[in-house]
Amino acid sequence: MPMTSRRVLMLAPLGVAAAGGLGFYAMLRGLGTGEYDPHGVPSALVGRTPPEFSLPPLVPSGLPLLASADLQNLEGPVLVNFWASWCVPCVVEHPQLMRLKREGVAVYGVNYKDKPEAAMAFLARHGNPFQRLGRDEPGRVAIDWGVYGVPETYFVDRKGVIRWRWAGPITPEVLEQDVRALLRHYA
Amino acid sequence: MRRLLLALALLAVWLPLALAVSSPSEMLPDPAQEQRAQEIGRQLRCLVCQNESIEDSHADLARDLRHIVRERVAAGDSDAAVIDYLHARYGDFVLLRPPFNLLTAALWGMPVLALGGGLAAILLLRRRGAAPEPLPLSAEEQARLAALEKDPAE
């Protein structure tokens, strides 16, 4: 057998193993940094405008309702946050939403599959970060947005295009790293 | 006997799970439409539990999606239109059978690659041919072989 083909035969499995190892390393690294999430459902709406919808207000809150018309020709970027009073991670992310409100960022809320009194009690206890608040009791508008669990937050730029979606609570890290960068970029 | 009992106990646990999927209240009155809705639902992934179809899942969202599938079927949508409806909202992830595109090319191409690689290896090995014929024995070796073959008892 000629020397070169023998060497190739010996190196080929090594090469395959090395490529596999590199891929595995990249996967683990991605899992560590959060860039790769095998359970994450990428949003089909990023780069598109929100679906047509109109949600009734949470009457006792006195906040204006939320409809797709409110997400067109905006003065600045808007965060649309799907939340519920029964959702534990929503409690975790609430201080970050309150902080965004204090900084003057427009946060619109969608109250998902919730009872009005429970939602009111949640806002009374944790504070109200929302400029507008729609009630999605049947959860159909959430499905039109591609929501698969609360909390979920969408970043809509001033042209009314969805630029980013975060499934899960907005932790202080997500606020500092992702939301601030988006706010700067789409200011 | 104990094994049988264990198997029966396991079955008793699993059976309701397998059947509780569509409670009669969720089902369409027309059996043909219900059959179609179930076939469509089995192709759609539950986004909460992820390794189950929406027909198999107990998650609230799966129940809502089953309801939407039945609503679209009852409204006269084709199977493809119903699947497109959810695909537009949840992307490729909602399809249990991933579509062929740039991202999934490696996934779909892997069997072809593996088969092609195997065939190429076989052809390469064949072309190299059988091992060369061994050299004939020298006179010295023939003599030694004859000596070894001789029965010592003779």
Image (cartoon, helix red, strand yellow):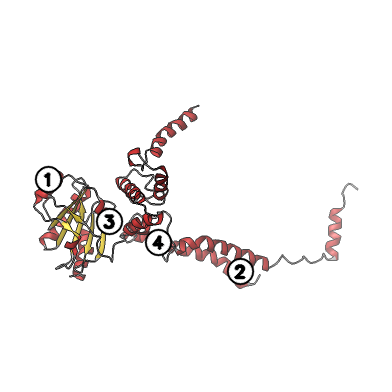
* Quadrant into which the N terminus of chain A falls: bottom right
Label 1 vs label 4, nearer the camera: 1
In the depicted view, which residue is nearer to us: B152 or A7?
A7
Query: Which mark is in front, 1 or 3?
Result: 3
First in sequence, mark 1 or 3: give its number. Answer: 1
Give the residue pinned by disc 4. Answer: A25
Q: CA distance from mark 2 to mark 4?
A: 29 Å
Please, what is the three-letter code of the amino acid marked with disc 1? Ala
- Residue B6 location, quadrant: top left
Q: Which disc, if any, is residue A121?
A: 1
Q: Which residue is mark 3?
A: A144
Question: Tag 4's secondary structure?
Answer: helix
SS for dot 3: helix
Q: Are marks 2 and 4 in contact (CB under 8 Å)?
A: no
The quarter in which the C terminus of chain A is drawn is bottom left
Which amino acid, mark 3?
Asp
Quadrant for residue A79, please give it. Answer: bottom left
Residue type at tag 4: Tyr
Q: Position of residue B72 (x, y in %)?
A: 34, 51
Mark 4–mark 3 Cα distance, whole angstroms, equals 37 Å
Marks 2 and 4 belong to one chain: yes
Crowding at label 2, few (<14), some or many (≥20) Cα neighbours within 10 Å?
few
Q: Quadrant of residue A9?
A: bottom right
Nearer to me, A114 or B81: B81
Residue at image coords 82%, 66% = B136
Q: Where residue A124 sits in the image (x, y, percent)?
A: 10, 48
Residue A37 visible in the snapshot: no
Query: Which residue sits at x=40%, y=34%?
Result: B13
Q: Please give the chain letter of the residue carrying mark 1.
A: A
Q: Earlier in the sequence, mark 4 or mark 3?
A: 4
Report the residue marked by disc 2.
Answer: A6
